[in-house]
Amino acid sequence: MLSSFSEDTTLNSEAGLQVAINSHFALKLAYNVIWNNNPPESAPDRTDTKTSIMLSYAM
């Protein structure tokens, strides 16, 4: 997803994999990257990353 408002542009990208463990449970692994061309001065870098592991249950 690309958001651009005047001088501030943000790019968000997520890659993920979801695998069924059994008929009720699934495991999802995801990697998210957010890039901002004009971050706040307090930000250490233009790029933020997040790795997540999720367990979901379906009834």
Image (tube, helix red, strand yellow):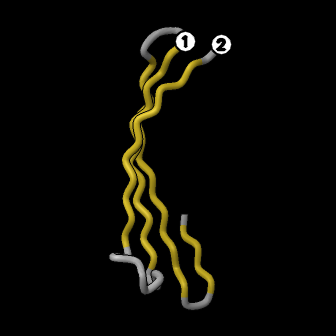
Amino acid type, callout 2: Met
- SS of the residue under disc 2: loop
Instruction: Assign the C terminus to one quadrant of the image.
Output: top right
Q: Residues within 10 Å of mark 1 (few under 14, many from 20)?
A: few
- C-alpha distance separating marks 2 and 1: 7 Å
For marks 2 and 1 on the same chain, the one whose residue lies earlier in the sequence: 1
Left or right of 27, for residue 59: right
Q: Residue at point 57% right, 19% down?
A: 57
Left or right of 3, for residue 53: left
> Which residue, as the protein is rendered here, is positioned at the far right?
59
- SS of the residue under disc 1: loop
Horizontal and vertical percent position of residue 46: 38, 76
Horizontal and vertical percent position of residue 13: 45, 58
Q: Residue at point 61% right, 17% down?
A: 58
Numbered mark located on residue 24 in the image: 1
Amino acid type, callout 1: His
Q: Which residue is mark 2?
A: 59
Using the image, determine if residue 24 lies above or below residue 7: above
